[in-house]
Image (spheres, grey):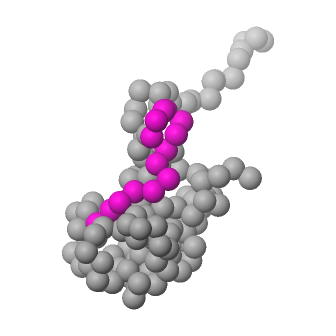
Amino acid sequence: MANEQPDPVESFNLSYIRSTPVPNRLLEIAARLPSTSIRVLLVVIRMTLGWQAGGRLNRRAAATISYREILHATGLRSAVAVSRAVNYLVRTGIIETVSEDGMSLLTGAERRGRRRPLRFRLVRTFVEER
């Protein structure tokens, strides 16, 4: 009993599990978002940070995602709900939407009527170390 060691801290070995690294700051902000916005944000995170790009530590900076894909991934039934969530996430500076020719699309009016899926990316301040 004199040399009794405390129990080691329980931990998980995640090296064999496919996973998506999510910056802590983004998780802290996501915890305060409306539920539909969280669901859309999770799709953007999965389609960007969840994909390796040229090596284990490199992740996609942006992904082309259609509203149909977001509807399917989230289980949402309304493109209007997706549009509102995207508007909210863009307005609050969490994600950016970009056209196929690289133009930043800041408003719903600018995104409306596009025939091609949009490029979504997380705002750099959430994914770069400071």
Q: Is residue 107 above or below residue 51?
A: below
**Main secondary structure type of the part rendered in magenta:** loop
Assign the N terminus to one quadrant of the image.
top right
Q: Nearer the viewer, residue 124 or 42?
A: 124
Point 29% across, 83% down: residue = 113
Q: Is residue 94 inside the magenta stretch?
A: no
Point 78% across, 12% down: residue = 2
Image location (x, y in percent) of residue 39: 38, 66
Image location (x, y in percent) of residue 48: 44, 52
Q: Quadrant of residue 123?
A: bottom right
Identity of the residue furthest to the front in this view: 101
Image location (x, y in percent) of residue 117: 30, 67
Is residue 47 found left or right of 58 in the rendered image?
left
Q: Is residue 4 above or below residue 93?
A: above
Q: Is residue 62 inside the magenta stretch?
A: yes
Task: Please provide the residue range marked out in magenta.
Answer: 53-66
Identity of the residue furthest to the bottom in this view: 109
Q: Quadrant of residue 124?
A: bottom right
Can you see residue 38?
Answer: no
Point 71% across, 15% down: residue = 4
Q: Nearer the viewer, residue 15 or 46?
A: 46
Image location (x, y in percent) of residue 23: 58, 51
Is residue 103 found left or right of 43 in the rendered image?
right
